[in-house]
Image: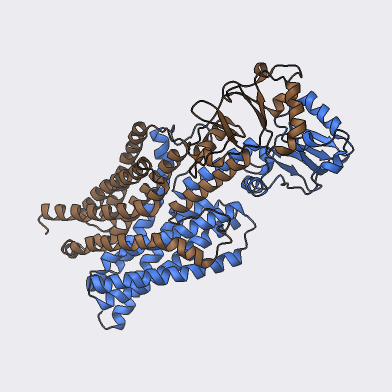
Chain colours: A blue, B brown
């Protein structure tokens, strides 16, 4: 089996070739003898893969099934013909999904002619899962992540930690500067109704919270099922967003109304809370999908990046709504 | 093997008992015959576990090693005696850690007398990993999570989604109300220096960002290595925090100084940014550890809960710093 070089993070880049292969026509006794003679050469003997004369994958049999089959049984009669497999350019996280959803230990990788190129074995699958989870979680938290043994969270040096965490905070400073400029541009609105300042962080926080929930769900759904139906996913997410936006808007409006005894404040806070939750969900559900489309990692889009965009949007919505309503009521 | 009932989420609750066991004194031929005769009864034959007359676990041999061993070899001479094992009350996520760090497919579970109670097999380990990851990620994003097949993110109904996401947002509304009250109580500070309002969301955002990074690292480190050294972890985290706080404080101070042409604003923003980053790291590193100590899930402590506390702290630091400095400079 000649090994081509496949891009990193694909099934092809994770292949091993030291595993047992049988030919159509072999019987169980032949396979058992082969296993006994060559067991030392194999990295794993969880499954024996069965190929035809063109190297095309025809079936698979587990070591357990080999032990429980009659010695003279033809392999075609006892092997599983319904195959789970990946292609060399399949993303490595898809392998985890296949192993999880089918409860199998290795995934065979085949080319377009269904010729067997190798398998991704159990220990690689578990490691890929760990890498992907660590990466997604860290990107989500705004931590650039170098995968490799030199970088485990517990052992990494303080300077490595600073170098990986600081870049995202710089994006935050940039976004924050934009947010601050927006608020300053509405200084006349603020001086008309100073209490608006009190609710600015609340609005930013709640929009972010709803956005983070949407991101978490979207990034994970994309990661585990790359064939996710975009349309039905969006539709449900927006039905949910409208309810959440209504509840948050109504509650915050009530708080402003009773706590601050200000009708117009209550109205501004309620309306802009509603609108900015919708905007936040739109941003944080849409971004991962867009990033995926242009082949960037959805987890990068989430966390700090989407939060920044969402914060700018929230503050713009808040102060534009406030301006419009204050003018409408003849207060400004 | 009598099965006791163990608490959920422990290794004991994940045991299977249909797997091959050999006795000290058996040879390879005996074991192979046993495997062939009983393969159908076993759920997995990845490893054969070797016990003595008291049921105490003495060794383990992989199916691959069985195939490559001489038929007449005594099991004691070929088995691995350095054992990786768990106890029935070991947390299930520890099993994932053991499998990952040792590259093995099943983890045997033994009682205090080292008697073999069962094993946690490969497919259960992969599922536990998936459950734990899903749970941690979702709790992190402020989504209550029911584990079970009826609840997968893609298939869940809109109403399930609302029910799982709304509770955390309510905590946000509560925290937001507290934050808003704090700001309102400093209305005289705000009216003295209106530009302070522009930087309130920025400070909240950056403190949250640093806090989220710390949480991500802490929750994941605790999950994968429950024996994590608290002291050295804290020390490194605080060294990192001081540098990040200095950089963020200096940058934001520069932005205020040049963008807003206000020396006192620059000073207030810089000092309070520095202090609130330190506070955020303290809160988001400390909370998961405290939650762990009292046996609550660290992932719940993170995300929305720590963010809320951290937001309140940030606003208090900001406006107290502003008051003190404005009074100090005779401006209020």
Which residue is located at x 82 percent, y 39 percent?
Answer: A50
Q: Position of residue B122 (x, y in %)?
A: 62, 38
Q: Residue furthest left?
A: B330
Q: Nearer the viewer, residue B261 or A107?
A: A107
The number of numbered badges drawn on the structure is 0
Q: Residue furthest front?
A: B2
In which image quadrant can residue A183 be found?
bottom left
In which image quadrant can residue A196 be found?
bottom left
Q: Nearer the viewer, residue A34 or A41?
A: A34
> Can see residue A4?
no
Left-right relation of B262 to A304: left
Considering the image in quadrants, where does the N terminus of chain A appear?
top right
Above or below, B40 relative to A200: above
Considering the image in quadrants, where does the C terminus of chain A appear?
bottom left
Q: Position of residue A254 (x, y in %)?
A: 30, 73
Q: Nearer the viewer, residue B163 or A20?
A: B163
> Can see residue B31?
yes
Q: Position of residue B269 (x, y in %)?
A: 25, 52
């Amino acid at each position: 089996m000649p090994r081509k070089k496949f891009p990193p993070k694909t099934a092809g880049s994770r292949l091993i070739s030291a595993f047992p292969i049988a030919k159509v026509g072999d019987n169980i006794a032949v396979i058992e003898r082969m296993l006994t003679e060559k067991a030392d050469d194999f990295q794993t003997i969880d499954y024996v893969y069965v190929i035809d004369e063109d190297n095309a994958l025809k079936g698979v049999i587990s070591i357990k099934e080999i032990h429980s089959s009659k010695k003279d049984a033809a392999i075609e009669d006892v092997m599983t013909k319904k195959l789970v497999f990946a292609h060399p350019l399949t993303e490595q996280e898809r392998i985890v999904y296949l192993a999880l959803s089918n409860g199998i230990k290795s995934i065979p990788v085949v080319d377009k002619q269904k010729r067997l190129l190798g398998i991704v074995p159990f220990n690689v699958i578990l490691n890929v899962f760990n890498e992907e989870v660590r990466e997604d979680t860290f990107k989500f938290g705004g931590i650039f992540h170098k995968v490799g043994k030199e970088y485990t969270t517990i052992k990494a040096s303080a300077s490595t930690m600073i170098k990986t965490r600081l870049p995202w905070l710089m994006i935050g400073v940039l976004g924050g500067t934009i947010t601050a400029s927006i608020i300053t541009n509405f200084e006349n609105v603020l001086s008309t109704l100073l209490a608006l300042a009190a609710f600015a962080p609340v609005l930013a926080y709640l929009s972010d919270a709803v956005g983070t929930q949407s991101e978490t769900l979207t990034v994970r759904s994309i990661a585990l099922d790359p064939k996710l139906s975009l349309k039905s996913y969006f539709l449900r997410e927006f039905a949910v967003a409208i309810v959440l936006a209504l509840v948050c808007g109504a509650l915050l409006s009530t708080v402003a109304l009773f706590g601050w005894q200000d009708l117009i404040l209550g109205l501004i806070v309620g309306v802009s809370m509603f609108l900015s939750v919708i905007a936040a969900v739109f941003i944080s559900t849409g971004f991962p999908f867009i990033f995926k489309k242009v082949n960037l990692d959805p987890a990068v889009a989430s966390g700090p990046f989407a939060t920044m965009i969402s914060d700018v949007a929230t503050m713009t919505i808040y102060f534009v709504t406030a301006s419009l309503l204050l003018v409408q009521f003849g207060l400004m």
